């Protein structure tokens, strides 16, 4: 069986008493699905909102609710849990728990365990807007941030108390993403300067229309995300996509192949690794009309001209960089990809059969072959995040050689 992303990681999830407590169930469930061991500690108030049984069912672990309950083993439970944690998450974090941790108060199982842990602690506040804006709460958050606690910024919107404002718990996916980031900050890419390109370029022929392609940007964004989590300094040059900017990544938006060419070449020399996942249009309309083209009797004709090949140019200029290309092919996958590896002077190419089911454009999975001058490695069908992780592993291996 495939090892899951968070296998072997223990997350202590503290749940405090706010209406958003039910959203912590989704967080627990997502982390569990990713392979983590999730140990939930609930405050008394939290149990007024959600039953411990719900978390027990989702995590397959007993939920800790009482400091003085008969222990399952003769360990001091808050100490053993605190030591076991690879990450300590508190979702939702009320003003009360934030105040306690910031001021060293440990008067129940959760606050005691939080004080005893040496793991990273990530708090996701959720409360009424006026409580959130209260300078006492803000100074507690500030104090905790300075001490190295992570705080997931709450979102703005309609709050349970009936008003609009900041104080909604951040989206569970965002909390999970930040948790993963904390957990996978393995240092193998620490400080490495990486440029990633993503998305499909758009080549306009009037102010409302363009020639484009099916690229969703998911593969390139996954590479940028995973590299950042592993400590790289990532710049993502991206053509338009529907995706959110990945956390911890510097993002530069472009539209056309020529804009991408300019953006990439301006910073290429400073990069240690360049990964070109973007689907760059090989051709653009020769002319772009100033105004919207109106329909009339005649059939419009769009003449195309060649765009620069960004990757080939990078290959020509390459000195000590590690250069990675993608090859989207619908036939003769390996032969075509090998030719691109050689012609564009690359160190590695990710060959992608776009005719395969659940692979290539738009979907969340991908099936690729990693081809270098030394060897060829066929990966099974994996999520794009996992493909990104395997690609980065391969790059580490080849750079060490
Ligand atoms: N690429 C690029 N600039 C272009 C075209 C492609 O930088 N104008 C890069 C892509 O980002 C990708 C690699 O080259 O990493 C291969 O792209 P692909 O579209 O598969 O190949 P092409 O070189 O365009 O060749 P063809 O379209 O003939 O298959």
Image (cartoon, helix red, strand yellow):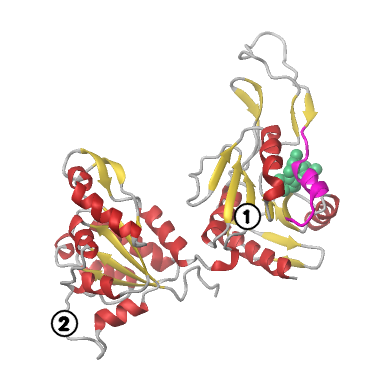
Is residue 279 visible to us here? no
From this viewpoint, which residue is outermost toward the bottom? 74
In front: label 1 or label 2: 1
Q: On the image, which quarter does residue 263 sit in?
A: top right
Q: Residue at x 76, y 46 (%)?
A: 311
Residue 213 horizontal side relative to residue 140, left or right: right
Is the residue at mark 1 in contact range of ligand 1, meaning its CB lies under 8 Å from it? no
Q: CA distance from mark 1 to mark 2?
A: 51 Å
Q: In this orientation, which residue lies closer to the viewer: 256 or 57?
A: 256
Q: Residue 379: which numbered mark, if any?
A: none
- Is 9 within the magenta? no
Q: In the rendering, at what x and y percent does residue 248 appear? A: 49, 52
Residue segment shown in magenta = 307-322
Q: In the rendering, at what x and y percent does residue 185 appear? A: 50, 65
Q: Residue at x 60, y 51 (%)?
A: 219
Q: Residue at x 14, y 67 (%)?
A: 44
Which quadrant contains ligand 1?
Answer: top right
In terms of sequence position, does the residue under pointer 1 or pointer 2 come before the other? Answer: 2
Q: In the rendering, at what x and y percent does residue 343 appear? A: 85, 50
Residue on which disc 1 sits? 193
């Amino acid at each position: 069986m495939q090892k899951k992303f968070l296998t072997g990681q223990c997350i202590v999830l503290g749940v405090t008493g706010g209406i958003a407590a039910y959203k912590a169930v989704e967080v627990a469930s997502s982390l569990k699905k990713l392979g983590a061991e999730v140990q939930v500690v609930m405050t008394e108030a939290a149990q007024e909102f959600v039953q411990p049984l719900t978390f027990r069912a989702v995590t397959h672990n007993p939920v800790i609710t009482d400091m003085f309950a008969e222990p399952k083993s003769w360990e001091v439970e808050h100490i053993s849990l605190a030591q076991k944690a690879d990450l300590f998450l508190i979702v939702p974090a009320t003003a009360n728990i934030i105040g306690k941790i910031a001021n060293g108060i440990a008067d129940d199982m959760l606050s005691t365990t939080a004080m005893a842990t040496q793991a990273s602690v990530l708090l996701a506040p959720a409360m009424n807007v006026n409580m959130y804006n209260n300078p006492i709460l803000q100074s507690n958050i500030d104090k905790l941030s300075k001490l190295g606690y992570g705080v997931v910024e709450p979102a703005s919107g309609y709050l349970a108390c009936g008003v609009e404002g900041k104080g909604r718990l951040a989206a569970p996916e965002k909390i999970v993403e930040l948790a993963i980031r904390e957990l996978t900050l393995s240092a193998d890419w620490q400080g490495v300067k990486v440029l990633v390109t993503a998305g499909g370029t758009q080549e306009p022929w009037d102010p409302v229309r363009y020639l484009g392609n099916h690229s969703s940007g998911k593969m390139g964004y996954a590479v940028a995300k995973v590299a950042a989590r592993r400590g790289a300094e990532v710049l993502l040059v991206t053509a338009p996509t529907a995706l959110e900017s990945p956390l911890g990544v510097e993002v530069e938006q472009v539209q056309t192949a020529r804009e991408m060419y300019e953006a990439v070449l301006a910073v290429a020399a400073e990069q240690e690794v360049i990964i070109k996942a973007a689907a760059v249009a090989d051709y653009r309309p020769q002319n772009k009309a100033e105004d919207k083209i109106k329909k009339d009797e005649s059939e419009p004709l769009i003449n195309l001209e060649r765009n620069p090949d960004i990757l080939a140019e990078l290959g020509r200029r390459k000195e000590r960089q590690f250069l990675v290309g993608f090859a989207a092919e619908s036939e003769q996958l390996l032969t075509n990809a090998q030719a691109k590896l050689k012609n564009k002077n690359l160190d590695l190419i990710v060959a992608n059969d776009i005719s395969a089911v659940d692979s290539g454009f738009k979907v969340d999975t991908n099936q690729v072959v990693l081809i270098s001058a030394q060897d060829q490695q066929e990966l099974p069908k994996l999520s794009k995040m996992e493909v990104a992780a395997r690609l980065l592993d391969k790059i580490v291996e080849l750079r060490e050689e």
